[in-house]
Amino acid sequence: MKGKYFAVDIPVYDSPGDYAMEILENLKYRQFTLKDAGITSRVHNNWRSLGIVPDSEEDGKKLYFDFIQYLWLQIVKDLRRFGLPLETIAAVKDYMFDEDFMAGVELDDDQRASFRKTFEEAAGRPITEEELEEVEENLKKRNTFYPYRFSLVVLNHFQHRSNTHLYVFPDGGVAVWSDAEQNANPEGKPDLDEPHINVPLGHYFAQFLNDETKAQFLPKIPILTREENEVLRAMRSDEVKELTIKFSKRGGKRRADLITKVDRELSDKQKKEIARILGTRDYSTITMKTQNGTQLTFEEAQRTRL
């Protein structure tokens, strides 16, 4: 698959579908064990018997999960912490891991025009009517692009780098909403008047980056760009001397820049906040000076969108 490069080292292919598949292949790489997920085999066997966790791959006596499944296990742990009944979690799981959610998709004229525009922006060129029809047909076929609904939700985070929220209701109903949708279609936000639990996916990405025991998994998961990874590496090895993070205006307001000068090492609180900013790409520019005198400056790199 021949690719070009956009911004830093993020591949952009002639077909947006190729780019999506490239990310999904990495996200579906099974490398996490139950120990990595922080779950005992007894708990997992119970959850599996109740239908609240997706199928895993067994190698000998060990189970292996991909990153999407790993995220789901972290969410289930928190839903249980909040006391959500297992039957409700099972209903949420059935919705998020529905394999046929794209079957029979039909786009109206406005949706089709918007769909074409998005794909052309991603491809960097006009697409033909035949190409658009082929993409539409692919979307209607089971597992062509997205194995299940939750894979699309996670993929959108990597492509838009905006926080996505899963709103879980007492009857097991789920509404998915992202900051990117808030900017593009504010009228489409779900009605949140009734009681619900808000599950912000950005929290789990930041949690993953803050856990140094997960550093070995980063090469296979495209959470950060090369420059962002360098900031994370320098932060963990206490090589940072000064770090300046500037923010974009949002809603007509500008946030104060985060300027961190380090005497010895960053505090745990600072590391958590910086990891959160990197994980959600909530910045406009980052400048880092290291203890050995090198300096790195880079801007937010927008990922290609489907």
Image (spheres, helix red, strand yellow):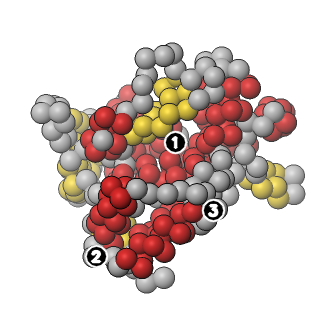
Residue 126's label in the rendered image is 2
Asked which quadrant contains residue 273, the reply is top left
What's the residue type where badge 3 is placed?
Asn
User: Which residue is labeled 1 in the image?
Assistant: 208
User: Which residue is labeled 3 in the image?
Assistant: 143
Asked which quadrant contains residue 180, the reply is top left
Q: Nearer the viewer, mark 1 or mark 2?
A: 2
Q: CA distance from mark 3 to mark 1?
A: 27 Å
For marks 1 and 2 on the same chain, the one whose residue lies earlier in the sequence: 2
Q: CA distance from mark 3 to mark 2?
A: 26 Å
Which residue, as the protein is rendered here, is positioned at the far bottom? 2
- Left or right of 24? Residue 163 is left
Q: Nearer the viewer, mark 3 or mark 1?
A: 3
What's the residue type where badge 1 is placed?
Phe
- Left or right of 278? Residue 213 is right
Residue 182 visible here:
yes
Residue placed most toward the observer, 239 or 46: 46
Question: Quick one: SS at disc 2?
Answer: loop
What's the residue type where badge 2 is placed?
Pro
Q: Quadrant of the C terminus?
A: bottom left
At 43% across and 17% down in the image, what residue appears? 193
Q: Residue 74: x and y, percent?
A: 61, 36
Relative to residue 168, is residue 28 depicted above or below? below
